[in-house]
Amino acid sequence: MVPLLALWPAAPAAAHGGPLVLDAAGDGASGVTVRATYKKDGHPVDDQVLRLVLNATADGGRKVGPVQLNPSNEGQGFYTTGAVLTPGKWTITVTSPEPNPGKAEVTVEARVAQTAPPPEADPSQDASGGAWRWWVAGGAVLLGLLIALVLFSRQRTPTASAR
């Protein structure tokens, strides 16, 4: 009986495809991140690269787009724009064409990207940064060379008794 089961045709795997759910959000600075999942099963789009297009309008009428989103390293199904928005409130529309149609519209607040704080000074060093130590070390080496030169030149100078 078991050998006959091997001849039984396998059921086709559930294939991805069809409409998408696009979740768009600001990235915390001046870009946009989009997560793309299949509407049918909610799985992330990881079997193809999508052509997602962003258009944005800011308060005051400023416009950005169309901008194509690129696959991101954040995970499967994530896409990002990079820094394309100026600070302010933006209405973002992201679309995906056939055969995987999808659309997302969201309002985001773009901000200037934060910079890392400067490193704190090491309290073990004084205000001069320890540069005086190099001067002392250099002077000691120079003094040692001068003494060696004097001793070496005295050994080579003939004395009156040696003549």
Image (cartoon, rainbow, N blue to C red):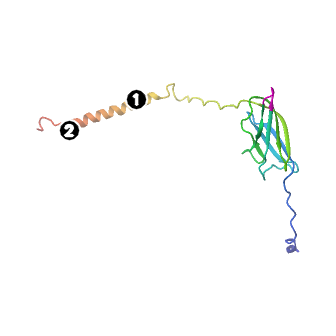
* Label 2 sits on residue: 156
Q: Residue 13 shows which numbered tag? A: none
Using a 10 Å C-alpha cutoff, classify the residue at mark 1 as few (fewer than 14 neighbours), some (14 to 19) or many (20 or more): few
- State the SS at label 1: helix
Q: Position of residue 56 (x, y in %)?
A: 80, 34
Q: Position of residue 60 (x, y in %)?
A: 80, 26
Q: Is residue 81 left or right of residue 133?
A: right
Q: Position of residue 24 (x, y in %)?
A: 81, 39
Magenta run includes residue 61: yes
Q: Earlier in the sequence, mark 1 or mark 2?
A: 1
* Label 1 sits on residue: 136
Residue at (32, 35) in percent of width and height? 145
The boundaries of the magenta stretch are 57-62
Residue at (12, 34) in percent of width and height? 160
Check the picture and name the quadrant holding the N terminus. bottom right
Residue at (39, 32) in percent of width and height? 138
* Dominant secondary structure (helix, strand or loop) of the stretch shown in magenta: loop
- State the SS at label 2: helix
Label 1 – label 2 distance at C-alpha: 31 Å
The amino acid pointed to by label 2 is Arg
Frontmost residue, 122 versus 80: 80
Using a 10 Å C-alpha cutoff, classify the residue at mark 2 as few (fewer than 14 neighbours), some (14 to 19) or many (20 or more): few
The amino acid pointed to by label 1 is Val
Q: Is residue 14 left or right of residue 125?
A: right
Based on the displayed image, in which of its 4 quarters is residue 148 positioned? top left
Q: Position of residue 144 (x, y in %)?
A: 32, 34
Based on the displayed image, in which of its 4 quarters is residue 53 positioned? top right
Based on the displayed image, in which of its 4 quarters is residue 119 positioned? top right
Magenta run includes residue 94: no
